[in-house]
Amino acid sequence: MGLALTLAGFSLAPESHAADWNVTNHVSVSARIGFNLSASFKGMGGAAGGASSRPTPDGSPYNYDDGYVLTDISGNAGGLTWNWGYDDSASQVSGNSILLHRTSSTSGSTEGDMDGSDPFLGGEISFISQFGARESFRYGFEAAVNFMPFDFDGRSVAQAMSSVTTDAYPFAPGTTPPTATTGAPYQVAGEGSDLTI
């Protein structure tokens, strides 16, 4: 909704016009119509992304989109951890390794245009008060408030750059990692299979 306030401390009018204005206080109401209003928006920021916000069994956040590899209670002694999990054996087990992916996005820009093709109806209320007259002039106070509700249909384009990092974590040769599916991911809540980090 648009709202404008106009205030004038003093209003001077020549005597020829003032002769038509014999009322010292005057209130008027009038209609307003707006046509072909448009607006443009730029630089409103874009999307930024990172690892998944899902929690691990102990409440830590995932550090990958499709799994996590974190420090266990031993401090990852021997370069191994059991504090890990992943989502899908079929797509993430490759040879002797489990592949984990992290997507990162840099902030982009958004541009938008909005057009209002239909006319917008509004109104104005004004108040005029005459303080006095001096020779050929009258002076006074004038204030006005106008309003016009409007609604825009818009289109926008967002741009952002993203990249996917894939890290491979090997597991012990000759062993098979626990099975995981998208509906039942593997998550270690206590000691489990070791993963080399």
Image (cartoon, rainbow, N blue to C red):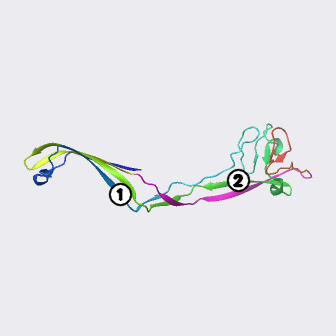
Q: From the viewer's perspective, is 129 left or right of 35? A: left
Q: Looking at the picture, which amino acid does disc 1 mark? A: Ile
Tell me the number on the disc at residue 10. Answer: none
Residue 16 occupies which quadrant of the picture?
Answer: bottom left
Secondary structure beneath dot 2 equals: strand
Q: Residues within 10 Å of mark 2 (few under 14, many from 20)?
A: some
Quadrant of res 160 = bottom right
Q: Nearer the viewer, residue 35 or 182?
A: 35
Query: The residue tagged with tag 1: helix, strand or loop?
Result: strand
Q: Position of residue 192 (x, y in %)?
A: 85, 41
Q: CA distance from mark 1 to mark 2?
A: 53 Å
Q: Residue at x 76, y 41 (%)?
A: 71
The residue lying furthest to the left in this view is 135
Q: Characterize the magenta stretch by its predominant secondary structure.
A: strand
Extent of the magenta region: 149-174
Q: Residues within 10 Å of mark 1 (few under 14, many from 20)?
A: few
Q: Look at mark 2 in the image and give the residue it sits on.
A: 102
Spot occupied by residue 80 in the image (x, y as percentages of width and height): 82, 44
The residue lying furthest to the right in this view is 174
The answer to whether residue 12 of the structure is visible from this angle is: yes
Tell me if residue 6 can be seen: no
- Residue at coordinates 53% horizontally, 54% vertically from top-left? 45
Q: Residue at x 80, y 55 (%)?
A: 92
Measuring from the top left, give residue 140's x and y in whole percent.
18, 44
The amino acid on which the numbered mark 2 sits, given as a three-letter code, is: Arg
Apparent side of residue 159 relative to residue 65 in the rendered image (left or right): left
Q: How many circles with numbers are drawn on the protein? A: 2
Q: Residue at x 83, y 43 (%)?
A: 78
- The residue at which mark 1 appears reads as 33
On the image, the x and y values in percent for residue 44 come to: 51, 54
